[in-house]
């Protein structure tokens, strides 16, 4: 049997020296110091080395993968297994094979996430427009670099960019790729760092090249004149909004609306959706349509299925007889992600610092960076030619007296002394002497000598031209422009995403689809709501309620009318009567707390039919105050279903009335007093939560109990209770002016 532990045993002092030593090592540290020393380096690493793209348009993971493939000879060679590429890339990227392969998939032609993919893939690489279509494992697929990658690596071996050590200092990699076109604007990119994010949409390559050329010629040019809008590999249609595009071009932030494309097949009475927004998937669209059909909000559709095959994306929607396909699509655009907004946040690393820039600023930074790349390339070529010219100068000296050179070599006893003796004999340096010493005997002839002399003259001209180029900004600009024109001519393709204008789109109006007919609504004390047609009422007008329930309110309206439900938690829920199914007198109806998604222990106290939102709402509180609020304060431009702060919460609510025009009301208190006043004495307020003004003065232990329209009361001596100014105490209720129960 286990020994029972005494209650005091856990409080004994521990004398174990190992435990005491461990406690001695624990030191208190302010949380700010912990964040600074532990979290800040991680956060900066995520921002600078992982999530935010740089001016060449790549994140480090993209750059490491592409450079590895370039060094493997996959720019001109045949495809190799993706697993081989992933393994080689781990020399630069230590984040694991799964992360590297995911990067390759996104850059691949098969996946289709980029307008101009950089990886020429073979095999199943999934699809960007599908959530469930997974790509095959890396051991099954093959890949190589796409032809456009020539524009990424053309200047790489000519010192155009800096090289840095990899993570274990065993090899070097480029810090940036010297792209000959603004890839930052062509390739879509997104990333989430710590405390910031980046979302770059792609633009058409031809338009980007034209815009960059126009900017190089005139930095004050109109960007929107050549850059029509984003272009996406999944196609679709951009709803043109000039103001929104200008905001994106100017600040780098904003959003654009994009929607899918469809065609109507009349012979089969179905709609085929063949292009969808870049931000959604086919599964998300189908799931939403199924949800709408289940909720009886899409009665025009009999079936929807995914018919995507090797020919491309296709979603088929079978229509019921008599359905207008254009109106149905307008409804789907509003209710599903077939129409979506794409956010833009052009956050880019420039010189190691994240900056949110508009298109103009991006072009400025890219042009400055590309200018530096071109100059470094020219310097590299210039130095190579100067080195060659230096060698030819030494050779020229030798060739002027070739017999002397031969004599020096023949008379030199040791091989190691040949170069020093040539340096002394002709006054040349070691590099020149080494070059001369390596010349083959067969090259010592008149033709070779004349060729070298002419080559020297040609080199001098080339060097002069390169020196002029590197010092002339206008010529450097021309080089960049010529490269952009060449890229456009070779790789540009027509826009995949077309542009439509708002006036060309027929807006969907839900009210046009909703049938309108007269109805009568009933609200019970227990929160049950019914909407009944006149025909159904004529058949049976005796309403069914629960045993302890009864009628609270009833009103006549139409099916399209809007309705508001005020609750005991100072909230109002808005809906349309068309949201409720037609009911019968013999059923309980909809339980509003569940139907409207109310908070726990929240209940309905009144319904109001606002109509055109004219008139006022009157709120009477137990402390004798009354608040008059314009009904327009409850109107909303959006489809908000819940408004908080519907009325003041400082005193319990005694009564609530919808006032369309001024009239006289009778107020009753628990002191058995009554007061008659005209609502014109109350000034309307714009704030819903106003406390109101004192109408009926109360003694401490009494409170306002009831408010009625004057014509609904049994008061006969009106002058006794009527007041001309507020507040007023009212008069004690006489027996002939009130029923016996109120007097008691």
Image (cartoon, grey):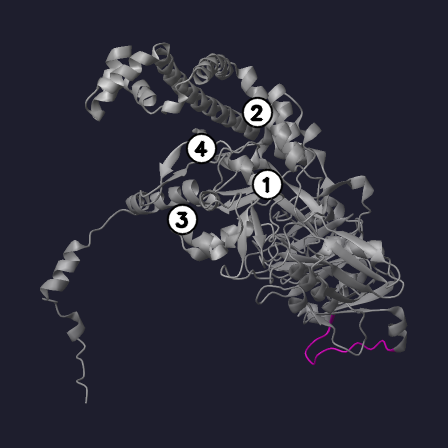
Q: Which residues are magenta?
A: 540-551
Judging by the rendered image, the residue that carries numbered circle 3 is 93
Whole-angstrom CA distance, mark 3 to mark 1, is 28 Å
Instruction: Identify the mark nearer the N-term, 2 or 3.
Output: 3
Which secondary structure lies at badge 3? loop
Question: In which quadrant is the N terminus drawn?
Answer: bottom left
Whole-angstrom CA distance, mark 2 to mark 3, is 32 Å
Image check: 320 left or right of 463?
Answer: right
Q: Nearer the viewer, residue 628 or 317?
A: 317
Vertical relation: 29 (above or below) 48: below
Visible residue check, residue 412: yes
User: Magenta stretch: residue 547 in it?
Assistant: yes
Residue 529 occupies quadrant: bottom right
Judging by the rendered image, the residue that carries numbered circle 2 is 480
Mark 1 Cα-neighbour bin, 10 Å: few <14, some 14–19, many ≥20: some
Judging by the rendered image, the residue that carries numbered circle 1 is 344
Image check: 260 left or right of 157?
Answer: right
Instruction: Identify the mark nearer the N-term, 2 or 1.
Output: 1
Image check: 171 left or right of 200?
Answer: left
CB under 8 Å between callouts 3 and 1?
A: no
> What's the residue at 59%, 31% (across, down)?
359
Judging by the rendered image, the residue that carries numbered circle 4 is 157
Which secondary structure lies at badge 1? strand
């Amino acid at each position: 049997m286990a020994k029972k532990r005494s209650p005091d045993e856990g409080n004994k002092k521990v004398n174990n020296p190992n435990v005491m030593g461990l406690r001695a090592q624990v030191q208190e540290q302010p949380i700010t110091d912990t964040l600074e020393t532990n979290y800040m380096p991680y956060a900066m690493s995520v921002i600078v080395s992982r999530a935010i793209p740089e001016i060449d348009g790549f994140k480090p993971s993209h750059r490491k993968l592409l450079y590895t493939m370039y060094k493997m000879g996959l720019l001109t060679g045949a495809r190799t297994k993706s697993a081989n590429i992933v393994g080689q890339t781990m020399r630069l990227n230590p984040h694991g094979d799964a992360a590297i392969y995911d990067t390759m998939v996104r850059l691949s032609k098969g996946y289709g996430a980029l307008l101009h993919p950089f990886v020429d893939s073979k095999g199943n690489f999934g699809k960007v427009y599908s959530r469930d279509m997974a790509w095959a494992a890396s051991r099954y697929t093959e890949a190589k670099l796409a032809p456009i990658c020539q524009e990424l690596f053309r200047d790489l071996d000519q010192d155009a960019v800096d090289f840095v050590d990899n993570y274990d200092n065993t090899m070097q990699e480029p810090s940036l790729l010297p792209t000959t076109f603004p890839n930052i604007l062509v390739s879509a990119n997104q990333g989430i760092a710590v405390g910031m994010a980046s979302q770059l949409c792609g633009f058409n390559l031809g338009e980007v090249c034209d815009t960059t050329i126009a900017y190089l010629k005139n930095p004050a040019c109109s960007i929107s004149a050549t850059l029509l809008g984003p272009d996406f590999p999944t196609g679709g249609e951009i709803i043109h909004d000039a103001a929104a595009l200008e905001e994106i071009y100017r600040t780098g932030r904003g959003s654009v609306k994009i929607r899918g494309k469809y065609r109507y097949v009349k012979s089969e009475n179905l709609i085929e959706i063949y292009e969808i927004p870049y931000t959604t998937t086919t599964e998300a669209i189908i799931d939403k349509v199924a949800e709408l059909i289940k909720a009886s909000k899409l009665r025009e559709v009999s079936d929807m299925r995914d018919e995507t095959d090797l020919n491309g994306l296709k979603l088929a929607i079978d229509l019921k007889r008599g359905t207008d396909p254009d109106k149905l699509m307008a409804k789907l655009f509003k209710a599903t992600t077939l129409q979506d907004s794409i956010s833009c946040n052009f956050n880019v690393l420039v010189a190691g610092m994240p900056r949110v820039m508009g298109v103009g600023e991006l072009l400025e930074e890219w042009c400055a960076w590309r200018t530096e790349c071109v100059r470094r390339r020219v310097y590299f070529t210039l130095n190579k030619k100067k080195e060659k010219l230096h060698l030819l100068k030494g050779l020229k000296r030798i060739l002027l007296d070739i017999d002397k050179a031969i004599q020096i070599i023949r008379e030199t006893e040791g091989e190691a002394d040949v170069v020093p003796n040539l340096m002394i004999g002709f006054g040349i340096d070691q590099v020149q002497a080494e070059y001369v010493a390596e010349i083959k005997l067969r090259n010592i002839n008149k033709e070779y000598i004349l060729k070298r002399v002419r080559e020297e003259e040609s080199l001098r001209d080339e060097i002069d031209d390169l020196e002029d180029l590197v010092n002339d900004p206008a010529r450097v600009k021309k080089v960049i422009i010529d490269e952009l024109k060449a890229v456009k001519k070779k790789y540009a393709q027509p826009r995949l995403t077309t542009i439509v204008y708002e006036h060309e789109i027929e807006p969907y109006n839900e009210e046009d689809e909703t049938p309108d007919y007269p109805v009568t609504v009933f609200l019970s004390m227990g929160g049950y709501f019914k909407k009944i047609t006149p025909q159904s009422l004529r058949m049976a007008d005796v309403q069914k309620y629960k045993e302890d329930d009864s009628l609270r309110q009833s009103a006549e309206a139409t099916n399209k009318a809007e309705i508001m439900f005020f609750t005991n938690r100072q909230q109002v829920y808005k809906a349309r009567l068309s949201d409720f199914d037609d009911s019968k007198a013999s059923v309980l109806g909809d339980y509003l707390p569940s139907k409207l998604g109310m908070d726990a222990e929240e209940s309905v106290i009144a319904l109001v039919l606002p109509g055109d939102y004219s008139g006022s709402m009157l709120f009477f509180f137990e402390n004798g105050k009354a608040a008059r609020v314009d009904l327009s304060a409850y109107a909303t431009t959006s489809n908000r279903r819940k408004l908080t702060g519907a009325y003041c919460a400082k005193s319990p609510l005694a009564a609530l009335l919808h006032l369309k025009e001024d009239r006289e009301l009778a107020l009753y208190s628990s002191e058995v007093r009554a007061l008659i006043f005209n609502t014109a004495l109350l000034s309307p307020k714009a704030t819903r939560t106003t406390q109101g003004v004192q109408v009926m003065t109360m003694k401490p232990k009494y409170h306002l109990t009831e408010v009625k329209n004057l014509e609904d009361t049994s008061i006969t001596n009106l002058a006794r209770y009527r007041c001309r100014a507020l507040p007023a105490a009212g008069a004690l209720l006489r027996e002939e002016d009130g029923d016996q129960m109120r007097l008691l």
